[in-house]
Image (cartoon, rainbow, N blue to C red):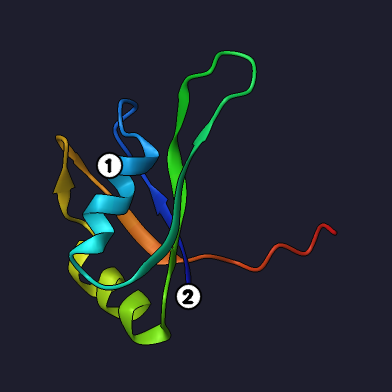
Amino acid sequence: MNLFVRNLDYNMTDKDLKELFDDIGEVVSARVIFDRQTGRSRGFGFVEMGSQEDGQKAIEELNGKDVMGRAIAVDKAKENTRR
C-alpha cells in the first residue's frame, strides 16, 4: 500500500521516514520529496508498505502523531494518472 505523508519537518530524511514506519511493519520504500531548484524538502513524502494491513495500521497509528515537533498526516496515496 502506498501512503502519502504530509506536514513533515523540513529536516526529515528518507532514512528518518523509513525508520518511523519500520516500527509499524515492512517498508518497501520511503521517500521525502525535495524541491529541484532549492534542494529543500517540500514537507511531504511517500511510503510504500509491504501489505494493505501494514498500510492501514500505519494510517491508524501515525496520522496526527507528533514527529519532530509537527503533527504529520498519513493517508492512502492517490494513483498517479499522468502517464
User: Which residue is at 32% across, 79% downward?
Assistant: 54
Q: Nearer the viewer, residue 35 or 31?
A: 31
- Quadrant in the picture for residue 79: bottom right
- Image position of 39 (left or right of 19): right
Vertical arrangement, residue 28 with respect to residue 14, above or below = below
Vertical arrangement, residue 77 with respect to residue 46, above or below = below
Label 2: few (<14), some (14–19) or many (≥20) C-alpha neighbours in 10 Å: some
Of callouts 2 and 1, the N-terminal one:
2
User: Which residue is at 53% across, 65% downward?
Assistant: 77
Element under disc 2: loop
Comparing marks 2 and 1, which lies closer to the viewer?
1
**Residue marked by disc 2:** 1
User: Which residue is at 27% across, 60% downward?
Assistant: 21
- Image position of 4 (left or right of 53): right
Location of residue 69 in the rendering, given as x and y in whole percent from the top left corner? 14, 35
Disc 2 from disc 1: Cα separation: 19 Å
Q: Quadrant of the C terminus?
A: bottom right
**Three-letter code for the amino acid on which mark 1 is drawn:** Asp
Location of residue 28 in the rendering, given as x and y in whole percent from the top left corner? 44, 65
**Three-letter code for the amino acid on which mark 2 is drawn:** Met
Vertical arrangement, residue 20 with respect to residue 79, above or below = above
**Residue marked by disc 1:** 16
Task: Give the residue furthest to the bottom.
Answer: 53
Task: Give the residue furthest to the top.
Answer: 38
Vertical arrangement, residue 59 with respect to residue 51, above or below = above
Element under disc 1: helix
Location of residue 39 in the rendering, given as x and y in whole percent from the top left corner? 53, 18
- Image position of 57 (left or right of 36): left
- Image position of 26 (left or right of 61): right
Label 1: few (<14), some (14–19) or many (≥20) C-alpha neighbours in 10 Å: some
